[in-house]
Every structure is written in C-alpha cells, then in structure tokens.
Amino acid sequence: MAEKRTYEVIFIIHPDAEDAEVMRLTEAVQKIITDQGGSITKTEMMGKRQLAYEISHKRAGIYVLLEVDGSGKEIAELERRMRVNDRIIRYMTVRVDEDRRRAEKLKGRRARKAERRPTAGKAKAEKAASDEGEAEAAA
C-alpha cells in the first residue's frame, strides 16, 4: 500500500454562490476524497474574500480549505473533477507532510540548543530555587 501523505487543498468558489451551494460543493469534494480512500482531517470555510487579481471577471471568491490524508490518487481525481466544475474558479493542492516533519525536527533542535545555553540553565536553576522557596514558605 502506498505511503499516507498530508495535503492542503484550497479552492475558490464563484462569489455569487449561496451558502447551500457552497456546502453542497464542499460535501461533494469531501465525498470524492473519501470514496477514493483518503480522509479529511480538517475543513475550514474561510468565507468570501477579495482576490489578489481578477479571475474570469471576478474580484472576490469564497475560499474553502481542506486538509487531506491520502496516497495521492484521490488528489488526482479531485483535481480532475475541480478542473471541469464551473463553480470552482481556482484550486491549489500542496503536499505539506515533509515540510511539517522538517519543521518539527528544527523545533526540537532549537529546543535542545536552548537547553545548552548557559543563560537557559541559570533561568531553570533560579526557577527551581524559587519553587523550592515557595514550597518551604507554604509548609
């Protein structure tokens, strides 16, 4: 079985779409993903926003962000279907699992480095001493 990857899919819906239509489109996209074997970890309706540039004579759009775990085949099918949907004016898919793994690694490295600094050691020792003093005063 293929490795599970994490993707962020953002798509922009036509600004004239009503709330019911936005929900229907979002549910259809989620159904495509789950039917293909993927899972949705987060759905964020970002609402109507100004576009950075005009797209198909539109200056605004309704943004929807999905976080998807899957193998990649569901993303291919999803993009194929979004490409032919007239109500979706733009979409973008970004693979984020490698970036998140790299960020966690750097975060851990920074934390270890901060512990080795002499000032960090002093601050911890002072905090421990003050905690002991408070405990003795309370007793």
Image (tube, rainbow, N blue to C red):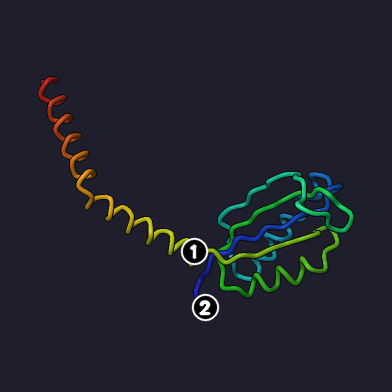
The residue at 60%/60% (across/down) is 8
Q: Position of residue 68 (x, y in %)?
A: 59, 62
| Residue 101: quarter of image | bottom left
Which mark lies nearer to you, 1 or 2?
Answer: 1
Q: CA distance from mark 1 to mark 2?
A: 19 Å
- Residue, far right: 57
Q: With 71 as the anchor, is 138 left or right in this view? A: left
Who is closer to the viewer here, 60 or 8? Answer: 60
| Residue marked by disc 2 | 2
Q: Position of residue 64 (x, y in %)?
A: 69, 52
Classify 72 as above or below 29: below
Question: Dot 2 lies on which element?
Answer: loop
The residue at 83%/49% (across/down) is 59
Q: With 135 as the anchor, is 102 left or right in this view? A: right
| Disc 1 to disc 2: CB gap under 8 Å | no
Query: Amino acid under label 1?
Result: Asp
Query: Amino acid under label 2?
Result: Ala
Label 2 Cα neighbours within 10 Å, binned few <14 / some 14-19 / many ≥20? few
The residue at 14%/20% (across/down) is 138
Q: Which mark is residue 99?
A: 1
Image quadrant for the C terminus? Answer: top left
Who is closer to the viewer here, 71 or 111? Answer: 111
Label 1 Cα neighbours within 10 Å, binned few <14 / some 14-19 / many ≥20? few
Q: Position of residue 118 (x, y in %)?
A: 19, 47
The residue at 72%/55% (across/down) is 26
| Residue 135: quarter of image | top left
Work out whether mark 1 precedes mark 2 in sequence or the reverse, and give the earlier one.
Answer: 2
